Amino acid sequence: MSLWGNDIKPKNLTDEEKKEVYATASGWVRESGSKWSGNDNTAATPEVLVAIGGLATNMGAADITEIEFVTTSIGAGAGGNIDIRVRFNESVDVDTSGGTPTVTVTNSQAGGGTDATFTAAYTSGTGSNEIVFRKAYGAADGGIADGDVLSIGTNVVALASGTIKDAGTATNSTITNSAAIGTAAGTLTVAA
C-alpha cells in the first residue's frame, strides 16, 4: 500500500463513511450523491473534507481499498447479474480497447453449481474511484446453484490485456488486494 493509504483518511469518519472518501488533487473528498453529504445529486462536485493540495499525485499509484458485492441476492432458477464493486483510494481510468479487466469470484459449490470460480467483467465506473464488474447467469444455467456461497479472495483483479490507470495519468494503478479486503467483501449465498 502506498504511503498515503486508506488508513490515513480523515479519522473522524466511520469505516462506513470512509468507503465513500477518496483522494483528488484538492484533498480527501466525499463521493457525490453520498447519503452522508445530504445531496443525492451524483453529478455534483464532490465535497472536499480535508484540503491537501496535490494529494492524489503525492499518493503514488491508486490502491484498492475495498471490494464488495453490489448484488445482495440471486437465485439459480431465475438467474441474473452478479455485480462486484471495487473501490480505489483515488479515481481511475479503465481502458478496454486491448481487453476487459476482470474480477475472479470463488464458488463453494455447496449447492452443486459447476463453476468453482468465475470471472466478472468490467462494466462501468471509469473516471471515478469505484468500478463495477458483472457476471450474468441465465436461468437454471448450472454454473451456480441454490446453496452455493460466493466469495472474494486475494488478488482477484486481472487486467486481461486492458488497463486500470490513475485518472488522467499514465500511472498503472495497483490491482492487488489483501486477504483482509477479500474477507471484508463478505459472501453472497445463492438462494431460490
Image (cartoon, grey):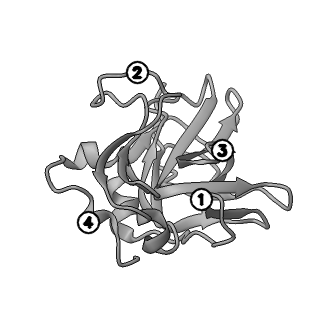
Real-space Cα separation, disc 4 to disc 3, in angstroms: 38 Å
**Element type at mark 2:** loop
Please report the residue visible at 66 percent of the width from the left and 55 percent of the height from the top.
93
**Quarter-of-image position of residue 81:** top right
Image quarter of the N terminus: bottom left
Real-space Cα separation, disc 1 to disc 2, in angstroms: 32 Å
Above-or-below relation of 19 to 60: above
Report the front residue among 79 and 13: 13
Please report the residue visible at 18 percent of the width from the left and 46 percent of the height from the top.
14
Q: What residue type is labelled 1?
A: Thr
**Quarter-of-image position of residue 10:** bottom left
Report the front residue among 180 and 1: 1
Above-or-below relation of 106 to 16: below
The picture places residue 16, in percent across and down from the top left corner, at: 25, 43
Q: Which of marks 1 and 3 is in front?
A: 1
Q: Residue 143 carries which label?
A: 3
| Residue under numbered circle 2 | 40
Report the front residue among 71 and 8: 8
Q: Which mark is residue 104?
A: 1
Report the front residue among 19 and 42: 42
